[in-house]
Amino acid sequence: MTKILRPLTGLEQVLSYEPGTGLLRWKVHIYRIKKPGDIAGGLNSAGYVEVRYAGVTYQAHRVCWYLYTGKDPGNAQIDHKDGNRANNKIQNLRLCTPQQNAVNKLKREGTTSKYKGVSFYRKNNKWQAQIRILNRSYHLGHYKTELEAHKAYCVAAIAEHDEFANFGKNSPFTVQQLSRAT
């Protein structure tokens, strides 16, 4: 499903952005309900903040980017570095391609491992590591421990995805740690 990207020009007249908090605030009275200084927007069902103005719904992270940089992101996507869709602080936002945005996803729930990129392989009672690159899955090997498999995933993620590598929230590894070790 492709979302229609609406031009953001003119929103600077009605909204202000606080880069340190990630909040959008109204500059004008809106529908006799919101007054200047009130927080604009609310969470949608997918966890993103949205702002509705003049009958049009805007994604807050795109509006924040526009208000901070003065440039409409157009067809580019905006990635939330920490994976938190509601965190619109400027240091958490970056322009990216759809592929870069996809690799920065958090670990899926309901998998056999607590770590991203790892699953239990019952045939040999070992942990296997895999990584997805351009919609294709690559096998990284079988390991005795879940942590060894996760480390293999993390090293491959750094090599393939660079700054967009995401190890998952509960990973004991950091990019800096593994970059020094290799």
Image (cartoon, rainbow, N blue to C red):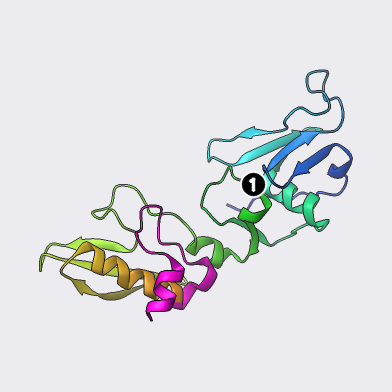
Q: Residue furthest left?
A: 124
Give the residues in magenta: 159-182
* Image vertical order of residue 166 relative to residue 80, above or below: below
Compared to residue 66, the image places residue 95 above or below, namely: below
> Is 9 above or below relative to 122?
above
State the image coordinates of residue 180 (x, y, percent, origin top left): 42, 77
Residue extending farthest to the top is 32
Q: Residue at x 61, y 54 (%)?
A: 92
In percent of the image, x 83 and y 18: which residue is there? 32
- Count the marks: 1
Quarter the C terminus occupies: bottom left
Q: Quadrant of residue 179?
A: bottom left
| Residue position marked by numbered label 1 in the rendering | 88
Q: Going by the image, does 38 lie left or right of 9?
A: left
Q: In the structure shown, which secondary structural element does the residue marked by tag 1 occupy? A: loop
For residue 136, say whether it is visible. Answer: no
